[in-house]
């Protein structure tokens, strides 16, 4: 039985006890906090959480989870001993006990029947594999972005979440941030007129395939290098990778379009009500001297233009997005501030103090969905589509030519592009 069903069973049991006139013995044996009668959350209502791979971003997420009265953090899995012990000690101090368990192998954590959900905040190379594995064990998943490194991984993840019936929330928290929500609402309401363009703030697309020089490999209990690599091609150990300097390396990273596009292309798809599709044409842009630029123009089947660009923004914060219609535009970013094209739209604006980088409300929605089994805003199906769009754009940029894409068949009109929809996985890993 799924752990969420077990929680409901315990809740129903307590109600049944009360209805059967058991009040005569419950107050004497069960503290009020166990029944949630003193403003606390009863143990039967708590989400039992595990975590897999906790670095800087994961620490921020975990702090929010651990600060919630309806969450109990139970176990940490990480390939680094120092991280396992740091997170364990933090949890034990918070709960004033020694119950937080540590693991190197995520399967050992996921096998625990008392774990309801997991936070996955590994490096990008592990996001798909760890999420699918958790889904097979029936665990709900909150996973940091990008959720995939390829088109194939995006589709495999969405299919697995659907097949195993879990709740999945991608860490694209801006779908639950006020200014981004309002900008999307303005775009969808028709107040901009018919949408003609949506603009996503992205980074320079390139990655490299350089290797750092080999260093002595630590003991597996200190840093399990083989597990750190996971499905990626083998390369010699270097401490810089483990310290976070894996971004920009092709084997571990999807490039600058995916890095921010997993947020901002996602915002554009949401605002344009394109969550179930992706653009059909991708055009890399070139500088006057013929060199490749960092911009990609893409077009949906109905002609709507998606512009992925790194410059020309109004300074409203990182991960900005702009929605352009025949009668005006709106732009916003992580600062919480917004800008519009005319006075008629100015009356729609509000200032939101929560920065776009804060996942508090996003995590709150996930926790509510774990309890209600409702599909969250950044579910696997919609996140997969925005990631697929970002992967397509990076493929076009690497090939330095226009390519066309069928979002139903998930195929290109270009043989080279089709070969780039997936990557080989190191044995024994497979989707």
Image (spheres, rainbow, N blue to C red):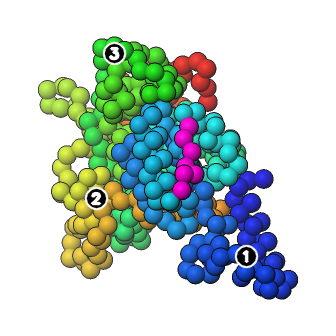
Name the outermost residue toward the right. Answer: 20
The tag earlier along the polypeptide, 3 or 2, is: 3
The residue shown at (30%, 18%) is 212
Measured Cα–Cα span from mark 3 to mark 2: 39 Å
How many neighbours does mark 2 have within 10 angstroms: few (below 14), some (14-19), or many (20 or more)? many
On the image, the x and y values in percent for residue 22 come to 82, 82
On the image, the x and y values in percent for residue 196 come to 35, 56
Name the outermost residue toward the left. Answer: 289
Measured Cα–Cα span from mark 2 to mark 1: 50 Å
Q: Which residue is mark 3?
A: 215
Q: In the rendered image, which quarter contains the C terminus?
A: top right
Residues in magenta? 97-103
Q: Which residue is mark 2?
A: 334
Eye-nearest disc, 2 or 1: 1
The residue shown at (52%, 68%) is 69
Q: Quadrant of residue 202?
A: top left
Q: Indicate whether residue 87 is drawn in magenta.
A: no
Q: Which residue is mark 1?
A: 29
On the image, the x and y values in percent for residue 272 come to 43, 58
The tag earlier along the polypeptide, 1 or 3, is: 1
The tag earlier along the polypeptide, 2 or 1, is: 1
Q: Indicate whether residue 99 is drawn in magenta.
A: yes
Tag 3 secondary structure:
loop
Which of the pair 62/249 is nearer the observer? 62
Q: Does residue 178 lie above or below 20 as drawn? A: above
Tag 2 secondary structure:
loop
How many neighbours does mark 1 have within 10 angstroms: few (below 14), some (14-19), or many (20 or more)? few
């Amino acid at each position: 039985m799924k752990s969420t069903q077990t929680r409901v069973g315990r809740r129903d049991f307590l109600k049944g006890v009360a209805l059967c006139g058991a009040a005569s013995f419950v107050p004497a044996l069960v503290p009020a906090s166990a029944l949630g009668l003193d403003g606390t959350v009863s143990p039967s209502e708590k989400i039992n959480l595990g975590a897999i791979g906790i670095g800087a971003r994961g620490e921020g997420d975990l702090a929010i989870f651990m600060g919630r009265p309806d969450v109990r953090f139970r176990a940490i899995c990480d390939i680094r001993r120092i991280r396992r012990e740091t997170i364990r000690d933090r949890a034990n101090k918070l709960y004033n006990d020694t119950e937080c368990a540590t693991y190197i192998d995520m399967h050992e954590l996921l096998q625990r029947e008392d774990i309801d959900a997991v936070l996955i905040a590994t490096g990008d190379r592990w996001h798909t594999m760890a999420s699918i594995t958790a889904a097979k064990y029936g665990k709900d998943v909150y996973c940091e972005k990008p959720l995939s490194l390829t088109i194939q991984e995006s589709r495999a993840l969405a299919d697995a979440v659907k097949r195993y019936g879990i709740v999945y929330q991608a860490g694209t928290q801006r779908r639950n941030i006020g200014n981004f929500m309002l900008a999307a609402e303005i775009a969808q309401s028709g107040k901009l007129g018919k949408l003609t363009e949506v603009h996503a703030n992205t980074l320079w697309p390139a990655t490299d395939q350089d290797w750092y020089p080999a260093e002595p490999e630590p003991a597996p209990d200190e840093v399990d290098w083989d597990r750190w690599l996971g499905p990626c091609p083998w390369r010699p150990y270097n401490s810089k990778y483990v310290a976070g300097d894996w971004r920009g390396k092709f084997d571990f990273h999807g490039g600058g379009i995916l890095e921010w596009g997993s947020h901002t292309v996602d915002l554009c798809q949401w605002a344009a009500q394109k969550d179930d599709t992706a653009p059909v044409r991708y055009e890399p842009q070139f500088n006057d001297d013929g060199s490749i630029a960092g911009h990609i123009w893409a077009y949906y089947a109905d002609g709507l233009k998606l512009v992925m660009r790194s410059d020309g923004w109004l300074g409203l914060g990182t991960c900005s997005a702009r929605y352009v219609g025949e009668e005006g535009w709106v732009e916003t970013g992580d600062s919480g501030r917004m800008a519009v094209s005319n006075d008629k739209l100015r009356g729609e604006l509000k200032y939101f103090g929560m920065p776009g980088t804060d996942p508090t409300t996003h995590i709150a929605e996930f926790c509510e969905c774990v309890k209600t089994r409702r599909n969250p805003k950044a579910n696997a199906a919609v996140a997969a589509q925005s990631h697929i769009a970002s992967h397509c754009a990076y493929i076009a940029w690497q090939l330095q030519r226009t390519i066309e894409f069928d979002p139903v068949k998930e195929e290109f009109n270009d043989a080279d592009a089709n070969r780039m929809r997936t990557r080989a996985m190191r044995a024994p890993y497979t989707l």
